[in-house]
Image: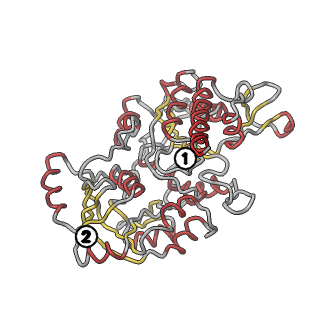
Amino acid sequence: MFQASVSGTVIKSSLIEPDGGVLVDVIVPESERGSKTLEAESMPKARLAKIDVEWVHVISEGWASPLKGFMRENEYLQSLHFNSLRMENGTVVNMSLPIVLAIDDETKKSIGSSKDVGLVGPEGDLLAILRSVEIYKHNKEERIARTWGTTAPGLPYVEEFIAPAGNWLLGGDLEVLKPIKYNDGLDHYRLSPKQLRKEFDRRQADAVFAFQLRNPVHNGHALLMNDTRRRLLEMGYKNPILLLHPLGGFTKADDVPLDVRMEQHSKVLEDGVLDPETTIVAVFPSPMHYAGPTEVQWHAKARVNAGANFYIVGRDPAGMGHPTEKRDLYDPDHGKKVLSMAPGLEKLNILPFRVAAYDTVAKKMAFFDPSRSKEFLFISGTKMRTYARNGENPPDGFMCPGGWEVLVKYYEQLQAEEAMPAVASA
């Protein structure tokens, strides 16, 4: 870990080890792909939904290290009840979200007593092999209650993927026949943990601080990120690198889509709000659960595997509004409190950030000063979307003009699309 002498001359940072000590990589080498594909063709098959492919991607590149496949029952129970996994050597690694593959009765029957199963993508192509499989009961209610802390209707991930899923879970070790690609023009942003670690080395980073987000970047975010870099320099680090790491898997319907967010993020770098020399923008391929303090552990743990030794956490991370009541689903301070105590995350430095808001006097985003609270304006994601939808500009200094333009263009296009069916039916 980091060491600094009083004079600041001795600086060491073994950028953090992946969980389990070795980065998992279960992508089959090119030389073996033909024979493995042939072998998979003769196996019983399980068909993957789009969400399952996202999880195959996550596991295959080592984001969930030391997990090597979809969870078997003993791993599932540890994750569900303890938010962690105990390794054979007795050490504990964090694993707060169950990463599982649901199958229906028919698939269970077709697998029978087979030990290996071929996994077929939504388009019918063979994507992977699951070895030494185990089938066990999918108790949906228990999974939902323990992951989200509620079984209230309207949880996006639950409604989309758990409620309609099969009643069985299929666990086993993955062999992924070729790297997962989406061919959406954004694959160059999807850097694996291995690629990110290489890039941190190339840039000679002695600290990497990760910022997880699923929203457009405004100047308040930039203030936090730039302030974090300043704090790390004051601590004695020489070259802290920011990993700006938007989530690229499933998000709920009213979130800004990934392609729009990536265009907006690139404008933020173009406009000089963040320094491209000390910032890496990449996509984190995980789906979003909106499971608050439970999920924020997963977000932090995955960044450890990518080589980040600092993690920025703010208000209500991975949270959302209660689906049936007018309140937040989670206490906004619990995410950062849980992260500071989470089993298996002791080696990660957690950086809780100060609250930023729009200073109506200075006309810019600034750290909130309670002594003059009336002079600050809090612009929520909902408020920001309302401005953009209505073609209104937010206050000067809230977001760089280039970034704001991207959002306005997106909402204009969305409103035009929404108006189309109305016109057609008129």
Q: In percent of the image, x 79 and y 36: which residue is there?
A: 377
Are the residues at dot 2 and dot 1 in contact (C-beta closer than 8 Å)? no
Q: Is residue 298 above or below residue 210?
A: below
What's the residue at 73%, 24% (across, down)?
396
The percent coordinates of residue 313 (x first, y second) are 61, 46
Question: 38 left or right of 3?
Answer: left
- Quarter containing the C terminus: top right
Residue that carries the numbered disc 2 in the rendered image: 132
For the residue pair 203 and 417, the one nearer the viewer reads as 417
The answer to which of 307 and 393 lies nearer the viewer is: 393
Taking the image as drawn, is residue 78 in sight?
yes
- Residue beneath disc 1: 349
Q: Secondary structure at mark 2?
A: strand
Residue at the top extreme, as displayed:
271
Q: Is residue 248 above or below residue 346?
A: above
Quarter occupied by residue 295? bottom right
Graded by Cα atoms within 10 Å as few (under 14), some (14 to 19) or many (20 or more), the crowding at tag 2 reads: some
For badge 1, the amino acid type reads: Asn
Depicted 310 relative to depicted 237: above or below: below
* Neighbourhood count class around disc 1 (C-alpha, 10 Å): few under 14, some 14–19, many 20 upward: some
What type is the residue that disc 2 sits on?
Ser
**Near-viewer residue (420 or 409):** 420
Q: Earlier in the sequence, mark 2 or mark 1?
A: 2
